[in-house]
Image (cartoon, rainbow, N blue to C red):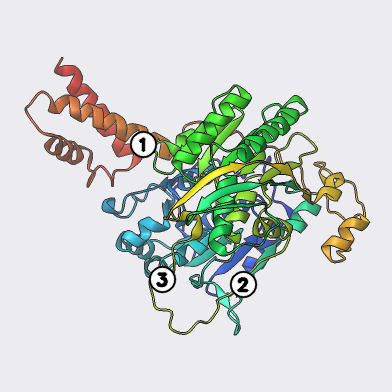
Amino acid sequence: MAFKRRRPLPPWPEARPLRDWQQKAIEALATHDGEAFLASATPAAGKTTFGLRVAYEMLDRGEVQRVAILAPTAHICRQWASDAARYGIDLEPNRPNSEGPEPSDRDGVVVTYQAVAAGARPHRQACNARRTLLIADEPHHMGEHAAWGATAMDAFAKAHKRLLLSGTPFRSDNSPIPWVEYDADGVSSASYAYSYTQALMDGVCRPITFLPYDGDMEWQSDGRRRRADFSIVLPRNEDARRLRTALDGEGDWIRRVLVDADAKLGEIRAGDHPDAGGLVIAIDKQHAIQLAGQLEKISGEAPMIVTSDEADASQRIARYAAGTSRWIVSVLMVSEGVDIPRLRVGVYATTARTELFFRQVVGRFIRRSPRPTRQMSYLFLPSDILLKTLASRIEEERNHAIEFKPGLEEGQLDEPPERRRSEPGVYEALYSDARPDEQIAIGENMMLFADPEPAKARPSAAFMAFGGGIAETVKAQPTEVELPSAADDPESAYQRRERLREERSKLVATLARRGREDHREINARINRLVGAPSVGKSTLDQLEKANERLRREVERGR
């Protein structure tokens, strides 16, 4: 059954042709008959464009009437909505559960996993009322809490299609991911996979060089003075304290690393990428402030600081992405799904050491931009043995494996390590210094494939040895012209709705101050006049008519 749209979608932009892997994944989806389709593609490969192309085609054919997208954070929800608007798809980001299903004048919603977990009912109602395509962005988040996965499965039980998009299709704990297929050994299976190595060969992603720094760290714990570099094997607690000593915001180790990272960024900006940016991942808010202070002294420019507890975090990230400033310092906010293509240099200054989190951070630096032609990225990090191991494995394609452990009850899983607070106890960082260790270059020998239209060539001997004998010739990808940033786009429908609701709030407040009616009475009266059930359920046309009526009333009362 095909549904007729009230308004046709505009033609897909010629500047955004599908990449080879995206087209093959769409072909695989067309013949897939499972409960859900899991597309596992390396970060920066273009999962958002792939997901929106699927949504575009299904809406255009009338196969579905709406799209519901689940995303990890409110910022990423807005990013999805902005990207969708470029293709004529009107999605409402971060719609509150209290407002119920979205009005029928929009194509769907983008909400967080946490929002769905807080209330499945409005999402279930919307899904049942209109045939829905569900897109789950980084679905491993549904395994963070048992209730999250269960509620999502309830809310979208009647979804017509389920598309799971992941750059990291595994978790750091033992939780199964809803709708993901597992074999008898508990290993996940992707419906379509596109690895970092393939993306490098296709010129889709940037190569990256890891720059580990060793050094001598000295700290005091349990009444004892301890000293060690990263080559010495230590008990788990002392291993963690050594890393924390290196990352101490006032220590010499981090100061030396920040100096060298800023010098590398300056070298890139002085070359053919003058707006290149750098990202520092900090431990917590206080640590971020310390590192930002160090960077300001080093570079002469105050970095932007972004933490998850700031109301304007999304706007700050967007301003940085569209600007030309040197550094941004973040805690968690820029670890996953955030699109800042100009990032070329990073400093991994956090104690988080899970493979999932590490890969998410690396994904921020391998997203190619149309210019310059050659684009090596650099990530500075401690010479911690676990982090170096994770760096050397970044090319490996990874699946989620469940370990069957008896006696593990629901709710007993630990909080992900990257979100835990610092360990308690008597500990004091005393001293640290830094010295460069051996570099780990991923894709360095494939730099000749980084041109927008690479010539056919054989992989180098070094790559053949490292990559296990991949003998394919390099494929020329269609040249992708960068679309305008969200900051440059005309006002989208969801942005207009937000502006109109903000304007309405001010107009209602002005009338309420005159004392004849309160806010609730004014809103109820205006809703009756324009035929809207409520402000939250108003269509765009109803919001515009309501504001026009309110403006006339305000003007008459002057």
Mark 2 and mark 3: Cα distance apart in space: 18 Å
Left or right, 517 with respect to 546, comes to: left
Q: Residue at x 39, y 78 (%)?
A: 409
Mark 3 and mark 1: Cα distance apart in space: 30 Å
Q: Please name the amino acid that badge 2 sits on.
A: His
Q: How many marks?
A: 3
Judging by the rendered image, the residue that carries numbered circle 3 is 157
Looking at the picture, tell me which residue is in the foreground, 91 or 326.
326
Question: In the structure shown, which secondary structural element does the residue marked by tag 1 occupy?
Answer: helix
Q: Position of residue 97 (x, y in %)?
A: 30, 54
* Pointer 1 local density, CA inside 10 Å: few below 14, some 14–19, many at least 20: some
Q: Position of residue 144 (x, y in %)?
A: 45, 64
Q: Do callouts 2 and 3 mark residues in contact (Cβ within 8 Å)?
A: no
Q: Is residue 227 above or below residue 326?
A: below
Q: Please name the amino acid that badge 3 sits on.
A: Ala
Mark 1 and mark 2: Cα distance apart in space: 38 Å
Judging by the rendered image, the residue that carries numbered circle 1 is 498
* Pointer 3 local density, CA inside 10 Å: few below 14, some 14–19, many at least 20: few
Earlier along the polypeptide chain: callout 2 or callout 3? 2
Judging by the rendered image, the residue that carries numbered circle 2 is 32
Q: Position of residue 476 (x, y in %)?
A: 83, 49
Question: In the structure shown, which secondary structural element does the residue marked by tag 2 occupy?
Answer: loop
Left or right, 338 with respect to 503, comes to: right
